[in-house]
Amino acid sequence: MNNFSIYIEKFVYLTINKNNNMMWLLLIVSGIMETGCIISLKYTNGFSNKYAIIFYTVFGFISAYLLSISLKHIQLGLAFLVWMGVSATGVIIAEHILFSTTYNHYKTIFMLLILIGIVGLKFLEQ
């Protein structure tokens, strides 16, 4: 497993070539993976559904791994805010689609504000 992790990290560094935009992309993908982790947690039914536990673990590991890579070039506080914003927005959207929760225009407005804040933070970072 350790060799696999080294190969993945080498691939990521060769791919991104220390490009800061790719670090932001990894951070956003990490937030999306965290959304999968949280939705999988809902399906575990108190950790009694073993398949949901496997998805929860895989999504959580990928999320943490991509977050840790992006933290090498993005400030911790800023990265955490973006990661949580993407995750929270993703969970709200997935919750509406998968669990048919109530949805209104106010949720849309506030999710857009979160996303505008993320874009604003990205531009301030440059």
Image (spheres, rainbow, N blue to C red):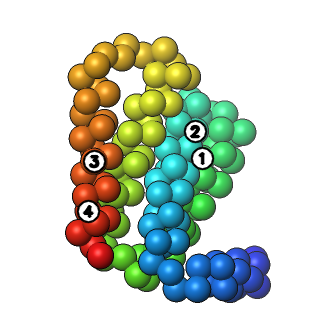
What kind of element bears circle 3?
A: helix
Viewer-nearest of labels 1 and 4? Answer: 4
Nearest the camera: 79 or 109?
109
What kind of element bears circle 4?
A: helix
Q: Earlier in the sequence, mark 3 or mark 2?
A: 2
Pointer 3: residues within 10 angstroms few (<14), some, or many (20+)?
Answer: few
Q: Amino acid at mark 2?
A: Ser
* 112 displayed left or right of 87: left
The residue at 38%/57% (across/down) is 83
What kind of element bears circle 1?
A: helix
Q: Which residue is mark 2?
A: 40
Q: Earlier in the sequence, mark 2 or mark 1?
A: 2
Asked whether the residues under the numbered discs 2 and 4 touch, taking CB atoms below 8 Å apart as contact, a structural biologist would say: no
Q: Which residue is mark 3?
A: 116
Q: Distance between the Cα atoms at labels 2 and 4?
A: 29 Å
Q: Amino acid at mark 1?
A: Tyr
